[in-house]
Amino acid sequence: MMLLTSPAPDRHTPLEDAQGLVSGTMLTALSVSFLHGSGLFTGQIAGLSLVLSYLTGWGFGAIFFCLNLPFYWLAFRRMGAKFTLKTFTAIALMSGFTTLAPNVLAFAQLNVAAAAVLAGVISGAGLLMLFRHGASLGGVGIVALYLQDKTGFKAGKTQVIFDCGVFLFAAFVLPFDKVLWSLLGAMVLNVIILINHRRDRYIAK
């Protein structure tokens, strides 16, 4: 009887990982520029960071970096040192790129609907690159996976609950039309991740 086995998955080289982290964070930083330029936000830690930046006047990059600090120990325990180092690197790059972006990028005209959709598409592409190189951009997903392991509560539900909290908070402090356009962008992002983030279709590590 012949047993058919799948070949061992290819491994990304350090150079491939480096370009994946840089390219992915550049795309996600560009999506933040679209959101910030139109007064919009998104879900997860990035969305909360944007809302807080609007309220405080502080830079998105610094807020985003600080909000993610409490999650690194959990990431180390749940996902290992390699994932944690890549995630820290991606978050640092994202914070740096978004801080530098206003110096090199400005919008003379930016339609809010176009900004919402483009941000969702670009962010989706950037996150897919990061996922495929073993990194992430936020602590909520790590907490969600941890709770799923410990309690059985589905990770997706945790992320939805957090996003609902971000949008509910924003509804009290931002114009309601901005909240609705932001919701459109978040839906576009989630659809792209849902359709394209399939481990069975991508075997490289």
Image (spheres, helix red, strand yellow):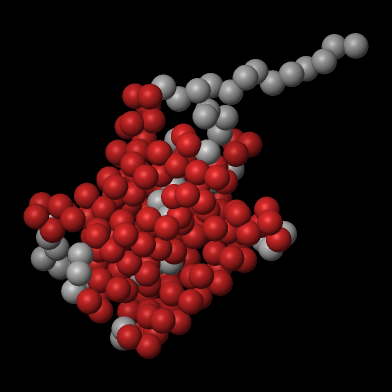
Position of 14 relative to 36 (above/below):
above
Q: Is residue 94 left or right of residue 138?
A: left
Residue at the far top in the pictured view: 1
Position of the N terminus by quadrant: top right
Determine the residue positioned at 71% across, 61% down.
151
Residue 59, percent across and down? 20, 65
Q: Is residue 24 left or right of residue 156?
A: left
* Relative height, residue 91 to residue 188 (above, below): above
At a point 22% along the width and 55% down the height, the residue shown is 98
Q: Is residue 183 visible?
A: yes
Q: Tell me where residue 156 sits by quadrant.
A: bottom right
Which residue is painted at 40% across and 39% down in the image? 86
Position of residue 160 in the picture relative to residue 126 (left or right): right
Residue 57: where, in percent of width, then height?
Answer: 18, 74
46, above or below 149, in the image: below
Q: Number of labelled discs? A: 0
Residue 148 x %, y % = 66, 57
**Residue 115 in the image, given as x and y percentages of width and height:** 29, 65
Q: Residue at x 37, y 88 (%)?
A: 172
Q: Is residue 113 visible?
A: no
